[in-house]
Amino acid sequence: MLKKIAYSGIEGAFAHIVARKLFPDELYVSYRNFKETYESVVSGESDLAVLPIENSYSGEVNDVMDLLFEGDLYINAIYSLPVTQNLLGVRGSRISDIKKVISQPKALEQCDEYIRNMGYEAIQSPNTAVAAREVSRMQDMSVAAIASLETAAIYGLKVLDEKINERDDNTTRFVVVSREKGCIASVEGKRSFVTVFTVEDGAGALLGPLQVIAEYDYNMKVLHSRPLKNHKWQYYFYVEIEGDIVNEKGDAMTRKLEKTCSHIRVLGPHFGDK
C-alpha cells in the first residue's frame, strides 16, 4: 500500500519537490497550510509530513517550530534542499516581453536586485508553485513567475533565465514528521536528535541544560529560541544535537536534562542533513 506523504501548498511547491525526492512513487497529498499538513499526520489521514523548518536566507519558519513544540509528532529526518529561483514565462515569450513577475514574498526578496535591474513590477503570490500555475493559466507573455525548474516542467512554462537569486547558497531545511520515532531508516546520514525544552525564568537558566549537553560530549549544531504563547517574555528552545541518544549515555543525559529543565521533549532520533 502506498504511503500518504503530506505537504503544504500545491504540486511543484518546494515541500512537494522534497517529498518526491525522499519518497519516490508514494502518494503525495497537498494541504492549505502547515497546521493542516501537521494535523493530517496526527489524525492518521497521512503517514508522514514534509515541512520547511529553516531557510539560510530568511531564517526559521516560526509556525512549524511552534507545531513541533506544541504537538506530539516526531522528527525522523532532516533534508536540506538547495533553492534556486528562475524566471519562467509562457511558451513563446522572451525576457524582453516581461513587465511583471509573480512569486512568493521571500522569493521576490531573494531576487530583489535582479527584479530592480530588469525594471519589473513585483506581485506577491502565496507560494512559488501557485505563481507558476497562475502564469500558466493567464497565458500573458508580459507576465512571468519566479519559481523552481521543476515547477516549470509541471506547469508547461518556458525557462527564460536561471539562478536569478542574489545568493547561490540559498538552502531550505525540511523535517519529515510521523507519529512514531525512527521510521525513516532509509534516509541516510549522520544520526542526530532534536529536543525542545523550557527553563525557569532567571539569570543563567539556559546555561544549565547547555552544560549538561556538553558534559555528555554531544555536539550541539543548532539552537533556536521562540516565545511561549500566553507567557510574556518566556521562551522555549529548539536544539539539534549530533550523535545517538538511544544508548546508556543518551538515557543518562536525558534524565539529567529533565531535572534541569522545567519541560523537555525529545522529538526523536533521526538521520541528519542529507
Image (cartoon, rainbow, N blue to C red):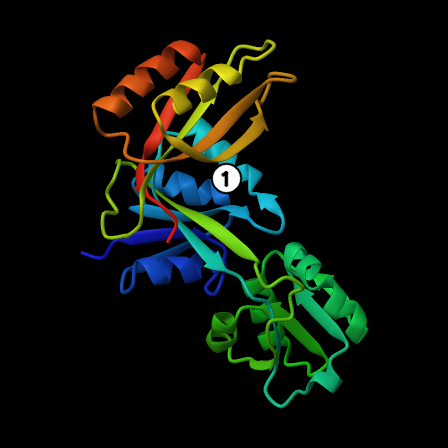
Q: Is residue 130 above or below residue 251?
A: below
Residue 46 shows in this picture? no
**Element at label 1:** helix
Q: Position of residue 247 (x, y in %)?
A: 21, 27
Residue located farthest toward the bottom when viewing the structure as drawn = 92
Q: Is residue 159 above or below residue 45?
A: below
Which of the two residues, 110 or 40, is positioned nearer the viewer here? 110
Q: Tell me which corner region of the image, top left, top right, bottom left or bottom right, holds residue 20.
A: bottom left
Can you identify the residue that label 1 sits on?
A: 64
Kindly identify the residue that appears in the image at 67 percent across and 64 percent down.
166
Q: Position of residue 62 (x, y in %)?
A: 56, 38
- 138 sits left or right of 116 in the view: left
Kindly identify the residue that appears in the image at 48 percent across and 40 percent down.
35
Residue 202 shows in this picture? yes
- 23 sits left or right of 88 in the view: left
What is the crowding at mark 1: few (fewer than 14 residues within 10 Å), some, or many (at least 20)? some
Kindly identify the residue that appears in the image at 44 percent across and 14 percent down.
261
Q: Position of residue 136 (x, y in %)?
A: 58, 76
Q: Tell me which corner region of the image, top left, top right, bottom left or bottom right, holds residue 89.
A: bottom right
Q: Is residue 187 above or below residue 145?
A: above
